[in-house]
Image: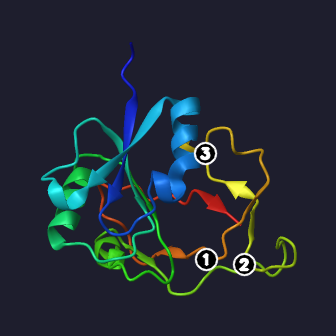
Amino acid sequence: VEKKRVVYSAIGHEEMTVPSGLGVLARFLDEREGIQLSPLPLKEIQAIPPDAEAVLIAAPQTPFEPREFDVLREYLSRGGSLFIAAMPDSRSDINLFLKDLGLEVRRGIVLDNYENYRSDRRFLRVQRFANHEINRGMQNINTTFIDPSTAVVRVVEKPPRHLNVTSLFYA
């Protein structure tokens, strides 16, 4: 029996979890990619487990402890992969962590005045997917994100040398 690859999903900051919104993602990863989505209580660990294919931080709503950011920094310095989905109105302090990576989540939401869905500018029509492994098979798909709170993540300064920051899609 082949051991499943693991993506850890951070918990402890009112993030989205499998029961609270990541169920479809968990099923997709399991059935299509052979990846298990497992909870990871950052407050309780000293290091990201060595079997981590990646770590997901899905829309945290409350602040992190500085030690948790240290655990994530150490993981990234070892070449780890991190996917952060952020909400524009979050009470999280994720920007304290992102600043060290040369990134920030901007206040406000992304609006699309031209290619909107059902005349609602908050719904983004994704036109292009970046050439990245996570987007395998998506290049020829034209889809609509039904999310009225898409945040802007922007590069504010050059990321550290050991990091590769990639935009995954464009509206």
Q: Of 133 and 23, which appears nearest the observer?
A: 23
CA distance separating discs 1 and 2: 7 Å
**Mark 1: secondary structure:** loop
Determine whether label 2 and label 3 are within 8 Å by CB. no
Q: Is residue 25 visible?
A: yes
**Mark 2: secondary structure:** loop
Left or right: 101 with respect to 132? left
Q: Is residue 88 above or below residue 80?
A: below
Looking at the image, which residue is at 54% across and 49% down? 23
Mark positioned earlier in the residue sequence (2 or 3): 2
Give the residue pinned by disc 1: 149
**Mark 3: secondary structure:** helix
Q: Of 48 and 103, which appears nearest the observer?
A: 48
Measured as percent of width and height from the top left, residue 81 is found at 37, 49
Left or right: 97 with respect to 82? left
Looking at the image, which residue is at 87% across and 73% down? 118
Mark positioned earlier in the residue sequence (1 or 3): 3
Q: Is residue 30 above or below residue 161?
A: above
Q: What residue occupies the far top of the structure in this picture? A: 1
Give the residue pinned by disc 2: 122
CA distance separating discs 2 and 3: 23 Å
Measured as percent of width and height from the top left, residue 37 is found at 42, 42
Quadrant containing the N terminus in the rendered view: top left
Badge 3 amino acid = Asn
Give the residue pinned by disc 3: 135
Badge 2 amino acid = Arg
